Amino acid sequence: MSVENCTVSCMLIDCDIHVGYETLRDLVPYLDGATAEIVEQSGTNGLGMPSYPWYHPTGWLRGDAYDRDAAADGVLMVGQTLDRVQAKVLDPFDVTFGILTPDEAASFAILPNAQLGAALCRGYNDWLLAEWLEPEPRLRGLLVVTPQHPQAAAAEIRRLGAREEIVGVFLPGAARIPYGSPVHDPIWRACDELGLPVAIHTHFEGVGIAGHVTAAGMPDFYTEYHALTGVGMLGHLASILCHGVFERFPRTSVIMMEGGLVGFVGLLWRLDTAWRACRTEVPHCVSPPSSYVHEHVAWTTQPLEEPPDERLLAPAIEGLDPCRTLCFSSDYPHWDFDDPRQTLSRLPAAWTESVAYRNAARVFSLPVAVPA
Amino acid sequence: MTESQLRVPLVDAPAPGETRMLELAGHEIGLYQVAGEFYAVANRCPHRGAPLCSSGRVVRGIGLQQEIPVRGETPRLLRCPWHKWDFEIDSGRCLVHPRLRIRRYRVQRERDELVITLKHPVRRPAQRPPAPTAQAVSSSGGSAVGPSG
């Protein structure tokens, strides 16, 4: 398939563009005094966040997304500036809206010190608004919050969730407790009040206070980890559906980001089978679990699975109701970035407009003119 | 088809492990040296179209010898900047996908120069060719077809 022969002929919404500070100290102007003191004075060189025990053997970032000469020890997102995002994503692909997702800031949700995590989230969200969302009208953001401190998370959602630039709430795939558990109800309630979706994005599984990547134990290699990241997200979706979250909070929804697609098809089939026999255990899940997908669940495309025979791809994911639920994402600037021209050309033409922008516009309530 | 050529003085040729970016008839080309030979390849990854040469890395890679991982002796692999797939510079072969190869161009040594030759379709008359440069020489009919800006 020649990418030069493919164009994105319609509007495009990119649901997963990662941005981040170069170091945590960049947040200091946006932090309360006590948290700033912790960030600046901890350890020997300031506060550090927990991170993966696996190191990417060939580089986390797209090689053309940063300046190698500017790379320095301790710097995370080298040169990840607004003008670079504009030049590499927004302008060349004529992106109507780009949804910004966190990079290291996702780790605030798996810090054992929940109060510190909540304070860092407040600083990060204010930084995101001031440095990215207010200067660039094509960008929208997701609030980073602390599931390990649901009350603080709910307060943060209510503090900023009504802002036009904020279109949802970000939770990492890594968690101590699956997100359908009633302990997270304050988060769902706040999202329900504001009509915001929750984006669950694979991040930091097996790190900090989060559970293992899988029940098999700790993977040895990054390669294993990367192929398994969707497993935790399967757990979150099963939890959310079986706890009847969308029965209690019907104005919210979830969008599953970067956890793969094919695995979710099998999960939904198995959940429905289990529900038929076990529904007395989960009476709050009033309908078959998969029946909530159409109104309340969406997925992002990247990393779009690469079967050895491309013809296998579309049938393998039809069970997700993709014309209604699938949303394009690039994952810029990470190494497994997907070019929108490639992604859309690999899916049936009948899905193009839905995947390129229609579904995302609906999920994130974006002001685009969507033909009936 | 027509041919365009680009001459590169040997003194400007890349050392092993280095990339020299060139442009010929609107095509971006990476020039490399492996084991004393020079190779010119297209700046496009055949997997997903990434800028393979301008943003990729020349690496030695790791292979197995008698089940022991060993580092390659010389930098002879080109690693894509996006998905990190490796390609042999000398053969163009992709190490992780048997059907993929990078596009290569002929490189000849002529005295103290390297001559890179690109074959490409003849441009239609309606299309205005890019401005010629002193380094570009066409071998088809005498009109120069040079690299575009």
Image: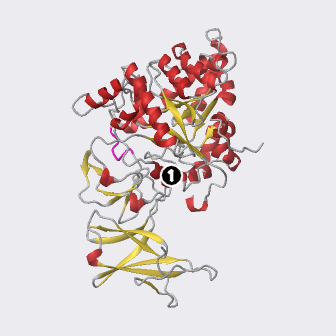
> How far from the left and from the top, in percent, is residue B119?
49, 77
- Look at the image and tell me whether residue A204 can be seen: no
> How far from the left and from the top, in percent, is residue A352?
67, 48
Majority secondary structure of magenta residues: loop
Residue marked by disc 1: A86
> How far from the left and from the top, in percent, is residue A287?
70, 18
SS at circle 1: helix
Q: Name which residue lies at 36% across and 20% down.
A: A112
Q: Is residue A80 above or below residue A279?
A: below
- Farthest left residue in view: A44
Name the quadrant containing residue A191: top right
Q: Name which residue lies at 52% across and 17% down.
A: A184
**B72 with respect to A267 (left or right):** left
Image quadrant holding the C terminus of chain A, namely top right
- The chain identifier of the residue carrying mark 1 reads A
- Look at the image and tell me whether residue A61 can be seen: yes
Image quadrant holding the N terminus of chain A, namely bottom right
Name the quadrant containing residue A107: top left
* A250, A300: nearer the viewer: A250
User: Which span is picked out in magenta?
Assistant: A55-60
Q: Is residue A100 above or below residue B143?
A: above
